[in-house]
Image: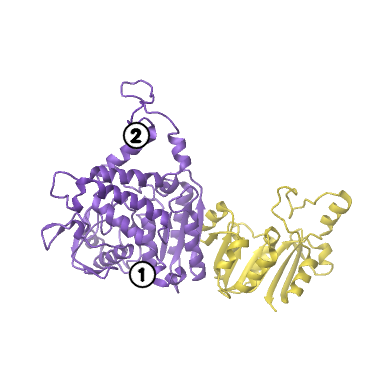
Chain colours: A purple, B yellow
Amino acid sequence: MSADAKNADDRFGLDKGVRLMGPVRLDSGAEFAPLDFAYETYGELNGDKSNAILICHALTMDQYVASPHPGTGKPGWWVNMVGPGKPVDTSRYCVICINVLGSCLGSSGPASIDPATAKQYGMDFPVITIADMVRAQAILLDHLGIETLAAVIGGSMGGMQALSWASLYPDRVASAVIIASTARHSAQNIAFHEVGRQAIMADANWQGGSYYGSDAAPDKGLAVARMAAHITYMSEGGLTEKFGRSLQGRSDGEKGTKSFGFEADFQVESYLRHQGISFVDRFDANSYLYITRAMDYFDLAEAHDGVLAKAFAGTKTRFCLISFDSDWLYPTMESRHVVRALNAAGASASFVELSSPSGHDAFLIDAPELNRIIDGFLRAGETV
Amino acid sequence: MTELRSDLAIIARNVRKGARVLDVGCGDGALMAALRDDNSADARGLEIDAANVSSAVARGLAVVQGDADSDLVDYPDNSFDYAILSQTLQTTHRPDKVLDHLLRIGERAFVSFPNFAYWRVRSSLLFGGRMPITPHLPLGWYETPNIHHVTIDDFRSFLKSRNVAIEGEWFLSGNKPRGGGLANFLAEHAVFLLKKG
């Protein structure tokens, strides 16, 4: 294909969307169609289509990995990692990021219109899994004409997708980068998610998930869910350093004092409330239920007699795992668990625990060591 | 490219082309890079220090952060042509178990270590009455990672008791190769190529 023809290919570029008929066969046994995809691509696909990299996003992220979010106007969520001259270099790679199935930024999710009823799916949207998200992504890549991926890269839930990609489609994945992630949700992970879901479902405005046509949405419940989850994304040390026991300054400029009431006296309370309130502007409560459920169901070993190494048997994929010492959501132990399975499977694996005060969110923060590792790992893949 | 440490150069010269190699305690991957570039080896590494692992991965090597004492158990039997343990044996908690794993994982094993019976070490202890500090044992007793000092003769008798065959041996003093005569006295460090007996 000539360069002009590629430029004219409207399957590629920013803020793309397409409806594909699928169907995708879901882990639940159901089939789902049609599939709406919202995605972005950066950089050019080369002639032999060997330079595609799929970035898989985390729970509440989106396809706007390296371009501004249309709702909030904020820069892409991984601009330090993805772009020209960045570790995931869009002058060398064609980078694709797809809003996951179940989300609310344009891909099919509970807030999408069900063509069969012309109304939002709500709770009629099927319960999905991480593997279902990946199977759906594969359908979009087929549509884009991309058979093999130079790399699949993801942090947190994105790492779960990257692991699933390598396990479900070993021949399509040359390299996989899994950051601050896990091969299974722990009881503690599930427990925190359940708090969030219960907060949403306890909000009277949730209305059994059918709030779309009404004036009221379960904003309070979703905000509380976000507040609880946000704590798990930060380290205890990070919270202490940022806020300690500092009191909130009063609006009249006076130094903060205890109110002997239930206002946000402490700065950390005010911070969390802000996190919750701003989240509801950009996320759908039902999507939050569905995606957290998908994460809780995630156990890559489950389909392999409980033996994780079997999920990678005979794999030719190169793996790179990175964990952070202050991440207590998916602690280093979980990455080691995957590395152990990869070693047992004889896979090519790299793994390092990096030091950071930022907890789970460290994967989103610009860090020279993280950049250096990913850059070197991807470059080595180009010569294989 | 900087020149390989003398014991690593010996190992690099004696690994056959295209071999599958596990370098245990690979540091920043200097030997692995040489094996990959010059011997077309499929090299994997295990290294305890995070900064070393980062450097090795950044140069495109497959290195896992881990501990020889606890993490070798994860590797399947006979999954490599060679398992390499260079200047690391004396830092492990259980050198005997580490060596068992090397010979379980690799068809052959390269092991190099500083010889504690080297004459300068002996004289430091005999005449100085102090724990020796040499180019290969540069740190004081309280900060050295070397917790299981071993001599060439110790190692030989250890191999014999475990029925491990020696397929090759190289001795160095001042980074120069030397013959095997009086090695336990004259060699500063040693490299052995081992195979299950």
Label 1 and label 2: CA atoms lie apart by: 43 Å
Q: Quadrant of residue A97?
A: bottom left
Residue found 51% across the figure and 67% down from its top: A343
Residue type highlighted by circle 1: Leu
Quadrant the C terminus of chain A occupies = bottom left
Q: Residues within 10 Å of mark 2 (few under 14, many from 20)?
A: some
Q: Is residue A375 above or below residue B82?
A: above
Q: Position of residue A26 (x, y in %)?
A: 27, 68
Residue of label 2: A270
Q: Is residue A368 above or below residue B63?
A: above
- In the shown orientation, is residue A76 left or right of residue B95? left
Q: Is residue A14 visible?
A: no
Please state the chain letter of the residue tagged with numbered disc 1 in the rendered image.
Answer: A
- In the shown orientation, is residue A191 left or right of residue B129? left
Q: Secondary structure at mark 1?
A: helix
Mark 1–mark 2 CB contact (< 8 Å): no
Earlier along the polypeptide chain: callout 1 or callout 2?
Answer: 1
Q: Position of residue A367 (x, y in %)?
A: 45, 46
Residue found 80% across the figure and 69% down from its top: B179
Residue of label 1: A168
- Outermost left residue: A118
Q: For this rendering, which residue is in front, A295 or A92?
A: A295
Residue found 39% across the figure and 44% down from its top: A231
Q: Residues within 10 Å of mark 1 (few under 14, many from 20)?
A: some
Q: Secondary structure at mark 2?
A: helix
Q: Quadrant of residue B105?
A: bottom right
Residue type highlighted by circle 2: Ser
